[in-house]
Every structure is written in C-alpha cells, then in structure tokens.
Image: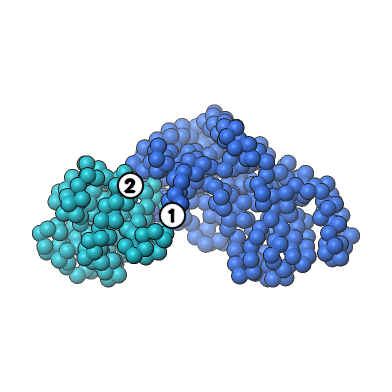
Amino acid sequence: MLNKMFSIYCDSLIEAEWFQNLSEKFKDSKIIKIKERSKNNNVIEDLIKYDRPDIILTKKGKALLVVEKMKEVPTGHNVGQRMARIVRASELQIPCIYFFPYRARKHGKHTSICNVNARLFFAINKINEIHKCSTVAVNWPSDTNGELVGDEKEDLELREIISDLIDCSFDKDNNIFNKLKENNAKSYEEAVKTKPQYSKPPGSVKIVLTESILNQKIIKKVLNNEDVKKLKKYKECCVYTIEMKKESCKRQDPYTGTQFIYEYSYCRVGTKVENREKNLILNFPLLKKEYFLSQNTNNFNTKSSNWYLIANAFLFEDGIHILR
Amino acid sequence: MNEEQIYIFSKTWFKKNDFIILGGQPPSGSDNIPVIEIKNINNLQKGSKGSYKPDLILQNKNNIIIAECKPFFNKLDNEKLNNIIFDDKRKETFFIELKQKKLFKFGLENDLNKFLQGLRYCQCFFGNYIEQEKIVLLKILDEKGTSELIQPKLNNFKIIF
C-alpha cells in the first residue's frame, strides 16, 4: 500500500511510463498529467512556475524529485534550454536529476559526435552551492559510434540511483547526491582540460564595466538618475547578446533557459535575485525596445514572463529597459 | 484513449510477444529508442524533407514491423504504410538506415532479400476498423491495454510468431 502513495506527474505519458519502470516500487504509483498553469495543485504549480519539468515525483502531497530527460547532447543552441526548470526545483529545495548524453552522435547531413558543453556542469555546480540543493547530471551512455544506448542498459545507473534514493527517502543531503556532484565536477574538469574555452564565457557573453554601458550615447540620453543608480550598484555587467530578429522575437527558448547559466556562472552569489555581484544584461542588438516589450509581456500565465525573472536590464538597438 | 496510451500499450504488447524494439518516434515526449527515418528517395541528401519516421519499429526472428499508432483507425496512417509497401526503393533505404545504425538483430543486416520478405506493416488503434489485405492491425481493447492482433488477409503479409 505504501507504494501507492507515489504520484508521478508528467508532461508526457511516455516519459512517465519510462520513469515508472525505473523501480519496482513505482509499479502502483499514480500517473497524472501536468495541466496548464494555474490548474494544478499548489505543489505542482510552484514547481512549474518557470517551466514544466518532464517528471515530478510526489508522495503524500510532497514533491520528492524532479527529473529532466533529454535525448540530445546539450551543445550549441540547446545547452541551457531546460535550466529554468532545474533552477526552480533548486529554489524549492527539491532534488533534481538531469539525464542526458554527455557524448553522442548528431545526425543529419553533417553528422558528427558532439560533447556536452561543460559550462552546463559549472552552472549546475554553482546552483547547488548557492541553493544548497542537489541537482545532478547523469549520463545517458552512447556506443563507440556515438549512437545512444537504447536497450534499457542506458537506465542501469539511474535505476541504482533511484533505488538508493527511495531507501534514503529522497534526502537531498544524502551521499548518493554528493557522489554524483563529485562526478559532475570531474566531468567539468576533464572537459576543460580538452577545451579550455569552457572555463571562460562563450562568444555571446561579455563581462564589461557598468560604466561602459552607461557611457553609451543612446543610454545616456534615456536613463534617469534612479535607473543609473540601480545599474551602478554593481561595478560589472554580464552582457548576454541575443541576436533575435523582429520576425522571430516572440519566443523564449532557448534564451530564457540559457540566461540562468550565465546568471549562476557569473552573477549570482545568493538565493535571491538581488544577491548578485554583477548585473545581468540581456542585449538585443537587432530589436527595438517597444516592439520586444509588446511581443514579450510580463504575463505570469505565459512563459514570456521568464524574460523578466532575473535580468537587471534589457538593452536594445534604440534604448534600455531597466528591470531592477 | 489518446495517442500516447496507444503507443505505450502497443509497445508493451509487442514486448510481451517476444519482439525487440529497434526504434521509433513517440507521438510526444521522448522515448529511449533511436528515431529511424525512412528517407524520401528523391531527397536522400537534403535532410529530412519528405522523410517518414515510423512510430515504432519492431523485430522478432521472422519479421521486422513498421507500426503506426493512433487513437482511432486512421486512413492517413493506412496510406503511409501502403506507400511503403509499394515502394521498393524506400524499403531499401530503410534497410540501409537500420544497418548503418547497427540496429538489426538476428544477423539480418547481411540479407536484404530476407529483410524484404520479412517486412510487415501494422496499425495500432482503438475502436472500429476496416479489415486489411496487407496491414496487420493491433486493436487496443481497453484502458488496461488488453489488445487483439488481427492478421491481414494475404498470407505473406501475416506476422509469423
């Protein structure tokens, strides 16, 4: 009867069925589809505030674990797409497992084996440090040709982890998580040895003096003293350039997820958005302010509100919008 | 019943009946199996345009099955499968795709003729249906996943267990 108390909330029944099969103890668990925002119970609503994770495991109305599963290697454009869900779990002190391939073949005309962008491990590590939580990456193995293992052997490590977690009642401070965090740290170090550029920000991110932003002619013209004071609170800015065009600027993915990688890697020092050492500036050089704001409103019921979660300001072709 | 349920019940039925799942593409979310593309013969070099990604691809010792899953018996799925039945070149590109991805079991990768002879087609669904000459039907009967296999009329299109 105890087993029946587990509930698996999911976005897709296929993922729920996969998760349920990871442990005999989930056999009789209830599978429930996550509904649209504002139509779920409070525990689920809280967890989906930024985005919807693949799996939320609950027991007696309490969230125990969030699982995010991805078949693609987090690289290129996709590195941070799912970060908002992971950060939300950490903010709420819910352990999170992010299951994805560290290395796999990308198919298509120019097929090749890709490796995970190690900045992801760095950001996850910082999220854990700051929120004192347990988000861990687990590798979906691939064969020598880079093809993903798909004969259920890929789940062996996860099965063991889940079994141990059930035994320790999903305690976020358990040794299992500590061991996995160490593994993630090692994965980062190894990746940086091969590709030292992962220890620095990518081309789309620049760390600049706040003064240099304030000295831009167009900015000087539009900012009042109050806004200047807000930005000057931090000596430096992490400027994340997003080259969205007018025709395609009503969107969030992958940018609103990726912003969390840069927020935690370079700006944030505490659990609250105001606990930071740098401004996070989202820079849209190809967009006009009014147009972007009209297309991406801060409406809590839509994901476009994620643009407004952590940035200090938006920078546009024709001006600036101060958020905090 | 929805498409995801039909997909899950069909997969479970085939597994219980000693089939190995080689690949497929679920209707939503992601499954752990490889996605297989049956490319359009006129567009082999240009990405995925016109290619067909079956919901499930299964193999036992005698047959390889291309299966499509829908909540109801679906005419478009029926057309999709019939298009493959009558297109030998696409069957060959399908063979090459499975071989390149090293997905074949039981040594079938070296025998195109045996592959072609053993190729079968299946529609998985809930509710009413039209009996088929060449397509196997897997009818899902209830929310528990109870299923009934309806073999096609022509003998050389029947699944051999």
At a point 15% along the width and 66% down the height, the residue shown is B133
Answer whether labels 1 and 2 touch (C-beta < 8 Å). no
Given residues A233 and A218, the one toward you in this image is A218
Asked whether residue A254 is in view, the answer is: yes
Give SS at disc 2: helix
Q: Would you name the residue on which mark 2 appears?
A: B100
Chain letter, cyan: B
Q: Quadrant of the C terminus of chain A?
A: bottom right
On the image, the x and y values in percent for residue A292 come to: 68, 67
Checking the image for residue B139, the label placed there is none
At a point 52% along the width and 58% down the height, the residue shown is A40
Q: Is residue A199 left or right of residue B4?
A: right
At a point 42% along the width and 41% down the height, the residue shown is A146
Chain letter, blue: A
Q: How many marks?
A: 2
Give SS at disc 1: loop
On the image, the x and y values in percent for residue A120 come to: 59, 43
Q: Amino acid at mark 2?
A: Gln
Q: Is residue A176 left or right of residue A133?
A: left
Which chain letter matches label 2?
B
Q: Amino acid at mark 1?
A: Lys
Q: Is residue A66 above or below residue A304?
A: above
On the image, the x and y values in percent for residue A230 come to: 83, 54
Looking at the image, the residue that sits furthest to the left is B155
Q: Quadrant of the N terminus of chain A?
A: top left
Q: Would you name the residue on which mark 1 appears?
A: A109
The colour scheme is by chain
Q: Is residue A239 above or below residue A199?
A: below
- Circle 2 crowding by C-alpha within 10 Å: few under 14, some 14–19, many from 20: few
Given residues A103 and A34, the one toward you in this image is A103
At a point 77% along the width and 67% down the height, the residue shown is A318
